[in-house]
Image (cartoon, rainbow, N blue to C red):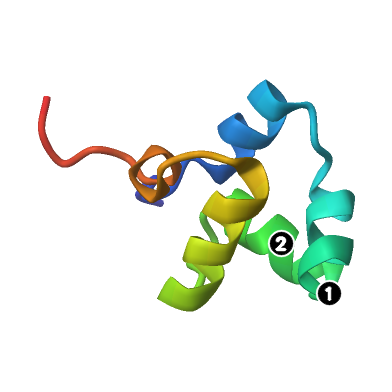
């Protein structure tokens, strides 16, 4: 499985749980877990909201395509 997002790592850095993010976003915790484990990817609007909640640039939530 290809790793596309870094949401799980950013949550750890910011000290926020997946459950708390799910509560704030009004999403099912299983949905957030699936996203954090790269089993599914968030819609762009949700990715933008996550970046705002975590106070990071949206690009920090994605794995870079450049080395």
Q: Nearer the viewer, residue 49 or 41?
A: 49
- Circle 2 — which element? helix
Q: Which residue is mark 1?
A: 28
Query: Is residue 17 in view?
Result: yes
The percent coordinates of residue 11 (x first, y second) are 68, 36
Residue at image location 35% in from the left, 49% down from the top: 2
Give the crowd class for mark 1: few <14, some 14-19, many >=20 residues within 10 Å.
few
Determine the residue positioned at 60% across, 57% down: 50
Q: Which residue is mark 2?
A: 32
Look at the picture and state if 25 lies above or below 43.
Answer: above
* Residue 43 shows in this picture: no
Residue depicted at x 40% and y 50%: 58
Task: State the separation of the CA atoms marked 1 and 2.
Answer: 7 Å
- What x and y, as percent, mark residue 32? 71, 62
User: Depth check: 5 or 23 in front?
Assistant: 23
Instruction: Indicate the quadrant containing the C terminus: top left, top right, bottom left or bottom right.
Output: top left
The numbered disc on residue 7 is none
In the rendered structure, the answer to whether residue 2 lies left or right of residue 30 reads left
User: Residue 44 location in percent, x, y?
Assistant: 42, 73
Q: Are marks 1 and 2 in contact (CB under 8 Å)?
A: yes
Q: At numbered mark 1, what does the secondary structure look like: helix, strand or loop?
A: loop
Picture residue at 62% right of the left edge, 50% below the top: 36
Is residue 65 toward the left or the right of residue 23 in the image?
left
Number of marks present in the image shown: 2
Between 9 and 45, the one nearer to me in the picture: 45
- Please determine whether, in this image, residue 13 is positioned above or below residue 26: above
Q: Position of residue 47 (x, y in %)?
A: 50, 63
How crowded pointer 2 is (Cα within 10 Å; few <14, some 14-19, many 20+) is rated as many
């Amino acid at each position: 499985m290809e790793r596309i997002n870094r949401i799980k790592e950013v949550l750890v850095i910011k000290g926020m749980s997946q459950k708390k993010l799910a509560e704030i976003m009004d999403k099912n915790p299983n949905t957030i877990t699936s996203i954090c484990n790269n089993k599914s990817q968030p819609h762009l609007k949700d990715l933008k909201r996550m970046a705002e909640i975590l106070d990071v640039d949206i690009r920090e939530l994605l794995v870079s395509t450049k080395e």
